[in-house]
Amino acid sequence: MDPGVGVRLAAAALGWLGGIAVQLQSQSLAARWQVAVLALAAMALLLRPHGAWRAWRLAVGLGLLGFSCATLQAEWRLAEAVPGALEGEDLLIEGVVATLPQATPTGVRFIFDVERALHDGQPVTIPRRVLLARYQQAGAGAHGASPAAPVPQSPDGEVFRAGERWRLPVRLRHPHGNSNPWGFDHELHLFEQGVRATGSVQAGRRTATAVRLDDRGDRPVERLRQQVRDAIHRTVPEPGPAGVLAALSVGDQSAIARADWQVFRDAGVAHLVSISGLHVTMFAWLAGAALRRAWAHHARASLYLPAPTAGWLGGAAAAVAYAVFSGWGVPAQRTVWMLLVVTVLRCSGRHWPWPQVLLLAASVVALLDPWALLQPGFWLSFVAVGLLMLSGSPQLTADSPPAGASGWLRTALRSQLVATVGLTPLTLVFFQQVSLVGFAANLLAIPLVTLVITPLALLGVAWAPLWTLGAWVTSHGTAALAVLAQAPWAVWSVAVAPAWAQWAALAGAALVVAPLPWRLRWLAAPLVLPLCVPPVERPASGAFEVLAVDVGQGTAVLVRTHRHLLVYDAGPQYSPFANAGERVLVPLLRARGERRIHQLMLSHRDIDHVGGAEALFDAMPVDALLSSLEPGHALLGRAGMDDACEWGQAWEWDGVSFEVLHPPARELARPIKPNAKSCVLRVSAAQGSLLLAGDIERAQEARLVAAAVPLASDVLLVPHHGSRTSSTSAFLDAVRPSVAIVQAGYRNRFGHPAPEVLARYAERGVRVMDSPACGAWQWRGPAPPAQGQCHRPAVRRYWHHAPSQGSAGSARISP
């Protein structure tokens, strides 16, 4: 390739990707006239092919064009939304089960393509694609079957299958997820899939019942995937191996047992048990190599099409077929686009340098899916390929496979070493942890999964006994990985590093795998060190930090002093197999660099306050547990020391005072409701004070006011999530907060916070932070409480939902 052409191509691709990256940082979409102006400016730059600064014109022009295209795509997607008047209303919809239904502990979940919708008998417009759940009890998280159940069905015995057409009574709402520092962006995940509403199928409604209209429907590929998954579970009785086979053949990752997922994550091989780029690429290579060999032996066929070209085309076709059959997931789509770009270049006789090939492939992926640039999988895939090419590793291509078994082994070892070393910094950037046994585990798992288990999973479609063999191999392979994953040093976690440390580490990773003299590669060590041992900011002595975590309908607050951490409540249990501790608190604590909980205070036994506690005990040491739990409770005995919270207890950490104001000792032994026993904690320092009120109600508030305990606080955790049974006028007059925090779920079924409660706070000029609108709320001393920050507005992007202000239980931030 002409160097000038290569420079212009690289500039064009980088400009395109840069324009999309800038658009993805927008809090709101640009107006149409602004997009039109940018597009016209882009065309003016691109239509001047000659002259000075050609590469710069290409970069700027395609950057403006990329920004405009991504904005138009986002606008089309955002146009599909649930009208505010229909949110939470009873609707009757008709359509098709678009994907494989997934069994959950509370029922079944599936994506539904809507063809028609009615409200009170009148047609209405709603999003074309919605995510529905059928719960055991409408609106509640009842206990149910294992998430790896072979045949997902509703509590009433209705079996939903992919491709069937149904008429369903539903209630819909806007997609809404928790918003915490470094947390998973659930709304982006749904937006990228084109899901613009979530909801539940209503059970036991008098006006309508779920009716299967057509058991054939359409979606032939999805129906075939359904049949294959059902056949796997009929053939393989063990749910663990059956789930892995279903994941590798039809892309049903939800079929993998929770315990197996934990093993795969800790061993660093989770990417191998989902339909990843590795599987699609390996499948394409094997199919292409086989077709190339067969084509070369057919003299007449070679006259029309050269065997190498036939191999590339056949491999690309096989990749598309496998990706479609496995559910056409986003990671598989990215790999397919990349392989198609490489195939087109190869078949056209062009041999571009690998950086240009990767940039072109990334540009095509970003054209079709702009939001891929925000996904860790996008960067891990492209960086892995780039590192292998930068290091000079032999490439596994249909044209030049390694010679002999020793060549294969050397190639595999070198490639795995380069990928492990080179991707470790990027893995720490995205996930703040890396598997120290990942190199050894992948040496075992990559050939086992890609060359044995995956082919058996796919060939079992033609001959089912192969699934039995695949299950046997999977069972023994998982057991071997479990031995590695159970090592106490298997997983290494770090705190989130500053941006400069992340970029320095990525540069160091490229340096260490580059084909350079070792005396230069050693320069990577100081570049990577700040990421591996990042600086962690802590409050000064005499000050404290508060983080009210967004856990949905539940309570969890972190109070940090200079050398100590107190966790007040552990959030809710979402289902028998999911809780706020595992999903929210443990990742958040690790990202903050916390290695120990010095005091865990569980205000009372309700599941929305203690649901995540067990996950905290499993994840890190807990020095002391202070609670109102009754004797014999399962959580007692898990900490280094247990004690009951009682009025009068007090201690000091690092110049910060802690005082328990409730319950009195005599209340703990009485057979009263758990809310009445809630532990109330006041934290005070020179910067101000905080009152954590648990779920106390009117009677307990009155007792506190009458006892003349020191209630006055700058920040109040609103009692009982804003229930109308709490936040009495006398109590608020005694506390006199300037900021009040409501931890509640979006459109929760309890209507928290109650309008009359919010009115009482408004009358006193208290600024109320409601977690559905605020997300996590953080206050760092010595700043005043008014300077506390909400996470959701700070990181808001255009795909995030801006909750309405009018309905009960909706989110609000009052001035």
Image (cartoon, helix red, strand yellow):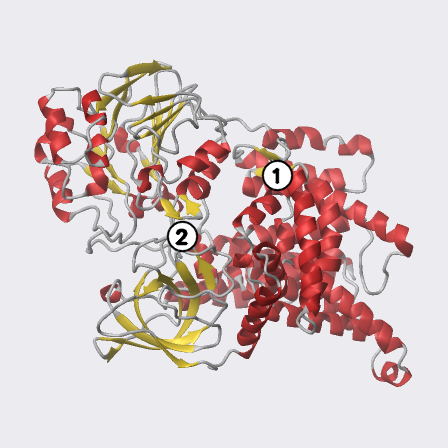
Q: Is residue 724 above or below residue 233?
A: above
Q: Decide if residue 402 is on the left or right side of residue 803.
A: right
How many neighbours does mark 2 have within 10 angstroms: few (below 14), some (14-19), or many (20 or more)? some
Q: Which residue is mark 2?
A: 797
Instruction: Judge by depth and name the residue closer to the eye, 161 or 777.
Output: 161
Write down the quadrant of residue 36 in the picture.
bottom left
Q: For marks 2 and 1, give the CA distance.
A: 29 Å
Q: Position of residue 657 (x, y in %)?
A: 29, 16
| Amino acid beneath label 1 | Val
Residue depicted at 42% across the width and 62% down the height:
108
| Amino acid beneath label 2 | Arg
Q: Position of residue 630 (x, y in %)?
A: 30, 30
Residue depicted at 71% across the width and 46% down the height:
442
Rendered-image quadrant of the N terminus: bottom right
**Dot 2: what SS?**
loop
Closest to the camera, between mark 2 and mark 1, is 1
Asked whether residue 51 is in view, the answer is no
As drawn, the label of residue 434 is 1
As drawn, the label of residue 640 is none
**Dot 1: what SS?**
strand
Q: Position of residue 755 (x, y in %)?
A: 14, 48
Q: Is residue 611 above or below residue 653?
A: below
Rendered-image quadrant of the C terminus: top left
